[in-house]
Amino acid sequence: MSIITTLKQSKKIHQSALGHTDEVQKPKHISKKSAALIRAKRKQQIETSQLIASILKGEITSLSQAITLIESSAEKHQNQVREIIAECIQHSGNSLRIGITGVPGVGKSTFIESFGKLLTEQGKKVAVLAIDPSSSVSGGSILGDKTRMEELVNNPLAFIRPSPAGKSLGGVARKTRESIILCEAAGFDIILIETVGVGQSETAVHSMTDFFLLLKLAGAGDELQGIKRGIIEMADAILINKSDGKNKEAALKAKQEFNRALHLYPPKQSNWKPKVKLTSALENEGIEEVWKMILAYEAFTKENAYFFKNRMTQNKQWMLQSIEEQLKNNFFNDESVKKELSIQLKKAENNEISPFEAAAYLLGLK
Ligand code: GDP
Protein backbone atom coordinates (compact mmCIF):
# COMPACT_ATOMS: atom_id res chain seq x y z
CA MET A 1 0.00 0.00 0.00
CA SER A 2 1.44 3.40 -0.89
CA ILE A 3 2.01 5.95 1.78
CA ILE A 4 -0.52 8.25 0.12
CA THR A 5 -3.27 5.62 0.27
CA THR A 6 -2.37 4.97 3.88
CA LEU A 7 -2.57 8.65 4.69
CA LYS A 8 -5.93 8.90 2.92
CA GLN A 9 -7.20 5.88 4.78
CA SER A 10 -6.03 7.21 8.09
CA LYS A 11 -7.83 10.44 7.26
CA LYS A 12 -11.01 8.42 6.72
CA ILE A 13 -10.54 6.65 10.03
CA HIS A 14 -9.82 10.00 11.59
CA GLN A 15 -13.08 11.40 10.28
CA SER A 16 -15.23 8.42 11.17
CA ALA A 17 -13.73 7.95 14.60
CA LEU A 18 -14.36 11.52 15.56
CA GLY A 19 -17.57 11.90 13.61
CA HIS A 20 -20.61 12.65 15.69
CA THR A 21 -23.84 10.75 15.38
CA ASP A 22 -27.02 12.36 16.53
CA GLU A 23 -28.28 9.42 18.55
CA VAL A 24 -25.25 8.26 20.49
CA GLN A 25 -22.92 10.71 22.18
CA LYS A 26 -19.54 9.03 22.74
CA PRO A 27 -18.10 9.24 26.26
CA LYS A 28 -15.63 12.10 26.35
CA HIS A 29 -12.62 10.15 27.65
CA ILE A 30 -12.88 7.55 24.85
CA SER A 31 -13.02 10.21 22.17
CA LYS A 32 -9.97 11.90 23.65
CA LYS A 33 -8.09 8.62 23.79
CA SER A 34 -8.88 7.62 20.24
CA ALA A 35 -8.10 11.12 19.01
CA ALA A 36 -4.69 10.89 20.67
CA LEU A 37 -4.11 7.49 19.09
CA ILE A 38 -5.03 8.79 15.70
CA ARG A 39 -2.76 11.78 16.16
CA ALA A 40 0.12 9.47 17.11
CA LYS A 41 -0.56 7.29 14.10
CA ARG A 42 -0.62 10.25 11.75
CA LYS A 43 2.59 11.57 13.27
CA GLN A 44 4.23 8.22 12.65
CA GLN A 45 2.96 8.20 9.09
CA ILE A 46 4.42 11.62 8.45
CA GLU A 47 7.71 10.49 9.98
CA THR A 48 7.65 7.38 7.80
CA SER A 49 7.08 9.33 4.61
CA GLN A 50 9.87 11.75 5.54
CA LEU A 51 12.16 8.81 6.18
CA ILE A 52 11.31 7.29 2.80
CA ALA A 53 11.93 10.59 1.04
CA SER A 54 15.38 10.98 2.57
CA ILE A 55 16.32 7.35 1.89
CA LEU A 56 15.47 7.96 -1.75
CA LYS A 57 17.75 11.01 -1.65
CA GLY A 58 20.54 8.71 -0.48
CA GLU A 59 20.86 10.08 3.05
CA ILE A 60 22.88 7.61 5.07
CA THR A 61 21.50 8.55 8.50
CA SER A 62 17.96 7.84 7.33
CA LEU A 63 19.08 4.59 5.71
CA SER A 64 20.69 3.53 9.00
CA GLN A 65 17.60 4.55 10.93
CA ALA A 66 15.36 2.49 8.66
CA ILE A 67 17.63 -0.55 8.97
CA THR A 68 17.43 -0.18 12.75
CA LEU A 69 13.64 -0.37 12.38
CA ILE A 70 14.06 -3.54 10.30
CA GLU A 71 16.06 -5.01 13.14
CA SER A 72 13.48 -4.12 15.77
CA SER A 73 10.92 -6.73 16.69
CA ALA A 74 8.37 -4.20 17.98
CA GLU A 75 5.14 -4.51 16.05
CA LYS A 76 4.77 -0.78 15.41
CA HIS A 77 8.25 -0.74 13.86
CA GLN A 78 7.41 -3.76 11.74
CA ASN A 79 4.35 -1.94 10.40
CA GLN A 80 6.49 1.06 9.62
CA VAL A 81 9.05 -1.19 7.90
CA ARG A 82 6.35 -2.67 5.67
CA GLU A 83 5.42 0.82 4.46
CA ILE A 84 9.03 1.79 3.90
CA ILE A 85 9.78 -1.40 1.96
CA ALA A 86 6.61 -1.07 -0.11
CA GLU A 87 7.78 2.34 -1.35
CA CYS A 88 11.49 1.57 -1.61
CA ILE A 89 11.02 -1.66 -3.52
CA GLN A 90 9.82 0.38 -6.48
CA HIS A 91 13.22 2.03 -6.56
CA SER A 92 15.25 -1.10 -5.95
CA GLY A 93 16.83 -3.81 -8.08
CA ASN A 94 19.42 -1.66 -9.81
CA SER A 95 22.51 -2.86 -8.01
CA LEU A 96 24.81 -5.77 -8.51
CA ARG A 97 24.55 -8.06 -5.48
CA ILE A 98 27.72 -9.97 -4.71
CA GLY A 99 27.98 -12.70 -2.07
CA ILE A 100 31.33 -13.34 -0.35
CA THR A 101 32.13 -16.30 1.85
CA GLY A 102 35.16 -17.94 3.42
CA VAL A 103 36.39 -19.09 6.81
CA PRO A 104 37.48 -16.52 9.40
CA GLY A 105 40.98 -15.31 8.62
CA VAL A 106 40.86 -16.01 4.88
CA GLY A 107 40.88 -12.28 4.20
CA LYS A 108 37.25 -11.32 3.54
CA SER A 109 37.40 -7.92 5.18
CA THR A 110 40.81 -7.15 3.66
CA PHE A 111 39.41 -8.15 0.26
CA ILE A 112 36.28 -6.03 0.74
CA GLU A 113 38.47 -3.11 1.76
CA SER A 114 40.57 -3.36 -1.45
CA PHE A 115 37.63 -4.20 -3.67
CA GLY A 116 35.51 -1.42 -2.16
CA LYS A 117 38.33 1.05 -2.68
CA LEU A 118 38.60 0.11 -6.35
CA LEU A 119 34.86 0.50 -6.85
CA THR A 120 34.51 3.78 -4.99
CA GLU A 121 37.44 5.20 -6.96
CA GLN A 122 35.29 4.55 -10.02
CA GLY A 123 32.54 6.60 -8.37
CA LYS A 124 30.42 3.61 -7.39
CA LYS A 125 28.47 3.53 -4.16
CA VAL A 126 29.20 0.37 -2.21
CA ALA A 127 27.15 -1.13 0.63
CA VAL A 128 28.51 -3.95 2.78
CA LEU A 129 26.01 -6.11 4.64
CA ALA A 130 26.59 -9.34 6.50
CA ILE A 131 24.85 -12.50 7.57
CA ASP A 132 26.24 -14.00 10.72
CA PRO A 133 23.70 -16.07 12.62
CA SER A 134 26.35 -16.86 15.22
CA SER A 135 26.41 -13.24 16.37
CA SER A 136 23.33 -13.78 18.54
CA VAL A 137 25.02 -16.73 20.25
CA SER A 138 28.48 -15.24 20.75
CA GLY A 139 27.01 -11.87 21.66
CA GLY A 140 29.23 -10.04 19.21
CA SER A 141 29.42 -10.00 15.47
CA ILE A 142 32.35 -11.62 13.69
CA LEU A 143 31.39 -9.74 10.59
CA GLY A 144 31.02 -6.14 9.60
CA ASP A 145 32.01 -4.58 12.89
CA LYS A 146 33.54 -1.17 12.90
CA THR A 147 37.13 -2.20 13.55
CA ARG A 148 37.25 -4.03 10.25
CA MET A 149 37.48 -2.26 6.91
CA GLU A 150 38.76 0.90 8.54
CA GLU A 151 39.31 2.83 5.32
CA LEU A 152 36.01 1.88 3.78
CA VAL A 153 34.14 2.86 6.94
CA ASN A 154 35.31 6.44 6.45
CA ASN A 155 34.64 6.51 2.71
CA PRO A 156 31.62 8.69 1.92
CA LEU A 157 30.66 6.40 -0.97
CA ALA A 158 30.54 3.33 1.28
CA PHE A 159 28.04 2.09 3.82
CA ILE A 160 28.90 -0.77 6.17
CA ARG A 161 26.35 -2.47 8.36
CA PRO A 162 27.14 -5.35 10.73
CA SER A 163 25.09 -8.52 10.66
CA PRO A 164 21.71 -8.20 12.36
CA ALA A 165 21.29 -10.36 15.43
CA GLY A 166 18.60 -12.98 15.45
CA LYS A 167 17.61 -16.31 16.86
CA SER A 168 17.17 -17.98 13.50
CA LEU A 169 19.04 -17.82 10.21
CA GLY A 170 15.67 -17.19 8.54
CA GLY A 171 15.15 -14.07 10.62
CA VAL A 172 18.67 -12.77 10.06
CA ALA A 173 18.39 -13.44 6.32
CA ARG A 174 15.05 -11.65 6.05
CA LYS A 175 16.49 -8.56 7.72
CA THR A 176 19.45 -8.56 5.33
CA ARG A 177 17.17 -8.95 2.32
CA GLU A 178 15.09 -5.99 3.42
CA SER A 179 18.26 -3.99 3.98
CA ILE A 180 19.35 -4.76 0.39
CA ILE A 181 16.13 -3.18 -0.87
CA LEU A 182 16.70 -0.03 1.18
CA CYS A 183 20.35 0.26 0.12
CA GLU A 184 19.32 -0.03 -3.52
CA ALA A 185 16.62 2.58 -3.07
CA ALA A 186 19.30 4.83 -1.54
CA GLY A 187 21.27 4.51 -4.77
CA PHE A 188 23.95 1.96 -3.91
CA ASP A 189 25.40 0.40 -7.07
CA ILE A 190 27.13 -2.59 -5.54
CA ILE A 191 25.93 -4.55 -2.52
CA LEU A 192 28.46 -6.91 -0.95
CA ILE A 193 26.99 -9.52 1.36
CA GLU A 194 29.48 -11.33 3.51
CA THR A 195 29.20 -14.51 5.56
CA VAL A 196 31.53 -16.86 7.42
CA GLY A 197 29.44 -19.83 6.41
CA VAL A 198 28.00 -20.88 9.75
CA GLY A 199 25.23 -23.44 9.30
CA GLN A 200 23.38 -22.74 6.10
CA SER A 201 24.37 -19.10 5.88
CA GLU A 202 26.15 -19.52 2.51
CA THR A 203 22.94 -20.86 1.04
CA ALA A 204 21.11 -17.85 2.45
CA VAL A 205 23.62 -15.44 0.91
CA HIS A 206 23.60 -17.34 -2.37
CA SER A 207 19.81 -17.03 -2.48
CA MET A 208 19.99 -13.24 -2.38
CA THR A 209 22.92 -12.47 -4.67
CA ASP A 210 23.73 -12.37 -8.38
CA PHE A 211 27.32 -13.52 -8.06
CA PHE A 212 28.86 -15.74 -5.40
CA LEU A 213 32.55 -15.56 -4.45
CA LEU A 214 34.32 -18.18 -2.36
CA LEU A 215 37.61 -17.14 -0.76
CA LYS A 216 40.12 -19.91 -0.06
CA LEU A 217 43.65 -20.29 1.14
CA ALA A 218 46.20 -22.51 -0.53
CA GLY A 219 46.76 -25.52 1.67
CA ALA A 220 49.12 -28.42 1.69
CA GLY A 221 47.94 -29.90 -1.58
CA ASP A 222 44.62 -31.51 -0.67
CA GLU A 223 42.64 -28.39 -1.46
CA LEU A 224 39.26 -29.99 -1.72
CA GLN A 225 39.32 -31.66 1.63
CA GLY A 226 36.97 -30.31 4.20
CA ILE A 227 35.04 -28.13 1.76
CA LYS A 228 31.34 -28.69 1.64
CA ARG A 229 30.51 -29.86 -1.87
CA GLY A 230 27.50 -27.54 -1.97
CA ILE A 231 29.67 -24.47 -1.61
CA ILE A 232 31.77 -25.31 -4.64
CA GLU A 233 28.57 -25.84 -6.58
CA MET A 234 27.30 -22.42 -5.56
CA ALA A 235 30.51 -20.53 -6.30
CA ASP A 236 30.76 -18.47 -9.48
CA ALA A 237 34.41 -17.89 -8.68
CA ILE A 238 36.97 -19.20 -6.24
CA LEU A 239 39.64 -16.75 -5.13
CA ILE A 240 42.81 -18.20 -3.71
CA ASN A 241 43.68 -15.32 -1.41
CA LYS A 242 47.03 -14.51 0.18
CA SER A 243 48.75 -15.41 -3.09
CA ASP A 244 51.82 -13.44 -2.15
CA GLY A 245 55.34 -13.98 -0.87
CA LYS A 246 56.07 -17.59 0.00
CA ASN A 247 52.47 -18.58 -0.67
CA LYS A 248 52.64 -17.91 -4.38
CA GLU A 249 53.71 -21.35 -5.47
CA ALA A 250 51.19 -23.21 -3.33
CA ALA A 251 48.49 -20.85 -4.59
CA LEU A 252 49.29 -21.68 -8.21
CA LYS A 253 49.02 -25.41 -7.41
CA ALA A 254 45.73 -24.85 -5.60
CA LYS A 255 44.41 -22.99 -8.62
CA GLN A 256 45.21 -25.95 -10.87
CA GLU A 257 43.58 -28.38 -8.49
CA PHE A 258 40.40 -26.35 -8.20
CA ASN A 259 40.24 -25.91 -11.97
CA ARG A 260 40.51 -29.66 -12.42
CA ALA A 261 37.84 -30.28 -9.79
CA LEU A 262 35.44 -27.74 -11.26
CA HIS A 263 35.42 -29.67 -14.55
CA LEU A 264 33.83 -32.57 -12.71
CA TYR A 265 30.81 -30.55 -11.63
CA PRO A 266 27.69 -30.39 -13.78
CA PRO A 267 27.22 -27.15 -15.76
CA LYS A 268 25.55 -24.33 -13.87
CA GLN A 269 22.05 -23.16 -14.73
CA SER A 270 23.57 -19.84 -15.75
CA ASN A 271 25.90 -21.64 -18.20
CA TRP A 272 28.70 -19.59 -16.63
CA LYS A 273 31.90 -21.52 -16.15
CA PRO A 274 33.18 -20.82 -12.63
CA LYS A 275 36.64 -19.26 -12.57
CA VAL A 276 39.57 -19.66 -10.20
CA LYS A 277 41.65 -16.53 -9.55
CA LEU A 278 44.67 -15.70 -7.45
CA THR A 279 44.45 -12.63 -5.25
CA SER A 280 46.42 -10.82 -2.61
CA ALA A 281 43.91 -8.64 -0.85
CA LEU A 282 46.70 -7.25 1.29
CA GLU A 283 48.91 -6.26 -1.62
CA ASN A 284 45.98 -5.31 -3.79
CA GLU A 285 46.85 -7.85 -6.49
CA GLY A 286 44.29 -9.51 -8.71
CA ILE A 287 41.48 -7.32 -7.37
CA GLU A 288 40.86 -5.51 -10.62
CA GLU A 289 40.74 -8.85 -12.47
CA VAL A 290 38.04 -9.98 -10.07
CA TRP A 291 35.96 -6.91 -10.90
CA LYS A 292 36.47 -7.45 -14.65
CA MET A 293 35.37 -11.07 -14.22
CA ILE A 294 32.21 -10.02 -12.36
CA LEU A 295 31.40 -7.51 -15.10
CA ALA A 296 31.89 -10.25 -17.70
CA TYR A 297 29.53 -12.47 -15.69
CA GLU A 298 26.94 -9.71 -15.54
CA ALA A 299 27.12 -9.16 -19.30
CA PHE A 300 27.01 -12.91 -20.00
CA THR A 301 24.01 -13.63 -17.77
CA LYS A 302 22.10 -10.57 -18.92
CA GLU A 303 22.67 -11.68 -22.50
CA ASN A 304 21.28 -15.16 -21.84
CA ALA A 305 18.60 -13.75 -19.47
CA TYR A 306 19.69 -15.92 -16.51
CA PHE A 307 20.37 -12.77 -14.46
CA PHE A 308 16.69 -11.78 -14.57
CA LYS A 309 15.32 -15.32 -14.26
CA ASN A 310 17.46 -15.88 -11.19
CA ARG A 311 16.16 -12.71 -9.53
CA MET A 312 12.58 -13.79 -10.26
CA THR A 313 13.23 -17.19 -8.70
CA GLN A 314 14.83 -15.49 -5.71
CA ASN A 315 11.74 -13.28 -5.27
CA LYS A 316 9.55 -16.36 -5.11
CA GLN A 317 11.87 -17.97 -2.57
CA TRP A 318 11.88 -14.79 -0.46
CA MET A 319 8.13 -14.78 -0.40
CA LEU A 320 7.78 -18.44 0.58
CA GLN A 321 10.45 -18.12 3.24
CA SER A 322 8.76 -15.01 4.67
CA ILE A 323 5.53 -16.97 5.00
CA GLU A 324 7.31 -19.82 6.78
CA GLU A 325 9.08 -17.41 9.09
CA GLN A 326 5.87 -15.55 9.92
CA LEU A 327 3.91 -18.74 10.55
CA LYS A 328 6.59 -20.03 12.87
CA ASN A 329 6.76 -16.73 14.75
CA ASN A 330 2.99 -16.55 15.13
CA PHE A 331 2.91 -20.08 16.44
CA PHE A 332 5.76 -19.85 18.94
CA ASN A 333 4.71 -16.40 20.18
CA ASP A 334 1.18 -17.55 20.91
CA GLU A 335 0.52 -17.38 24.67
CA SER A 336 -1.17 -20.77 24.99
CA VAL A 337 1.53 -22.42 22.90
CA LYS A 338 4.22 -20.78 25.05
CA LYS A 339 2.57 -22.16 28.20
CA GLU A 340 2.10 -25.70 26.88
CA LEU A 341 5.29 -26.13 24.86
CA SER A 342 7.62 -27.03 27.72
CA ILE A 343 5.04 -29.35 29.28
CA GLN A 344 4.58 -31.25 26.03
CA LEU A 345 8.31 -31.31 25.35
CA LYS A 346 8.87 -32.92 28.75
CA LYS A 347 6.13 -35.49 28.11
CA ALA A 348 7.54 -36.34 24.69
CA GLU A 349 11.03 -36.60 26.17
CA ASN A 350 9.79 -39.13 28.74
CA ASN A 351 7.77 -41.12 26.20
CA GLU A 352 4.52 -40.20 27.94
CA ILE A 353 3.19 -38.97 24.63
CA SER A 354 4.34 -39.53 21.08
CA PRO A 355 6.17 -36.51 19.62
CA PHE A 356 3.67 -36.46 16.74
CA GLU A 357 0.69 -36.42 19.04
CA ALA A 358 2.22 -33.66 21.14
CA ALA A 359 2.91 -31.62 18.01
CA ALA A 360 -0.64 -32.13 16.77
CA TYR A 361 -1.99 -31.09 20.16
CA LEU A 362 0.09 -27.88 20.20
CA LEU A 363 -0.80 -27.05 16.61
CA GLY A 364 -4.42 -27.48 17.57
CA LEU A 365 -4.10 -24.82 20.25
CA LYS A 366 -3.42 -22.08 17.76
P1 GDP B 1 38.44 -12.36 7.55
O1 GDP B 1 38.28 -12.93 8.92
O2 GDP B 1 38.13 -13.37 6.50
O3 GDP B 1 37.70 -11.08 7.35
O4 GDP B 1 39.99 -12.04 7.37
P2 GDP B 1 40.79 -10.65 7.50
O5 GDP B 1 40.55 -9.81 6.31
O6 GDP B 1 40.50 -10.06 8.83
O7 GDP B 1 42.28 -11.14 7.43
C1 GDP B 1 42.88 -11.98 8.39
C2 GDP B 1 44.38 -11.75 8.41
O8 GDP B 1 44.93 -12.12 7.16
C3 GDP B 1 44.76 -10.29 8.64
O9 GDP B 1 45.88 -10.24 9.46
C4 GDP B 1 45.09 -9.80 7.26
O10 GDP B 1 46.03 -8.75 7.26
C5 GDP B 1 45.65 -11.03 6.59
N1 GDP B 1 45.45 -11.03 5.14
C6 GDP B 1 44.29 -10.77 4.50
N2 GDP B 1 44.46 -10.85 3.17
C7 GDP B 1 45.77 -11.15 2.97
C8 GDP B 1 46.59 -11.36 1.80
O11 GDP B 1 46.14 -11.28 0.65
N3 GDP B 1 47.89 -11.70 2.01
C9 GDP B 1 48.42 -11.80 3.25
N4 GDP B 1 49.71 -12.13 3.34
N5 GDP B 1 47.70 -11.59 4.36
C10 GDP B 1 46.40 -11.26 4.23
Image: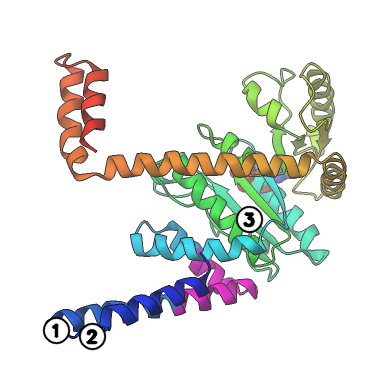
Q: Position of residue 86 (x, y in %)?
A: 54, 62
Q: Amino acid at mark 2?
A: His
Do callouts 2 and 1 mark residues in contact (Cβ within 8 Å)? yes
Q: Position of residue 292 (x, y in %)?
A: 87, 47
> Which residues are drawn in magenta?
46-66
Q: Residue 195: in sight, yes or no?
A: no
Q: Amino acid at mark 3?
A: Val
Q: Which mark is residue 25?
A: 1
Q: Dot 1, how many residues are within 10 Å of its Cα: few (below 14), some (14-19), or many (20+)? A: few
Closest to the observer, 240 or 195:
195
In space, the residues marked 1 and 3 are separated at their CA atoms by 57 Å
| Circle 3 residue | 128
Q: Residue furthest front?
A: 23
Q: Is residue 244 magenta?
A: no
User: Looking at the image, is mark 3 or mark 2 earlier in the sequence?
Assistant: 2
Q: Which image quadrant shows ligand 1?
A: top right
Q: Is residue 63 magenta?
A: yes
| Circle 2 residue | 20
CB at mark 2 closer than 8 A to ligand 1? Answer: no
Q: Dot 2, how many residues are within 10 Å of its Cα: few (below 14), some (14-19), or many (20+)? A: few
Closest to the observer, 5 or 303:
5
Q: Dot 3, how many residues are within 10 Å of its Cα: few (below 14), some (14-19), or many (20+)? A: many
Horizontal side of 143 relative to 70 (left or right) equals right
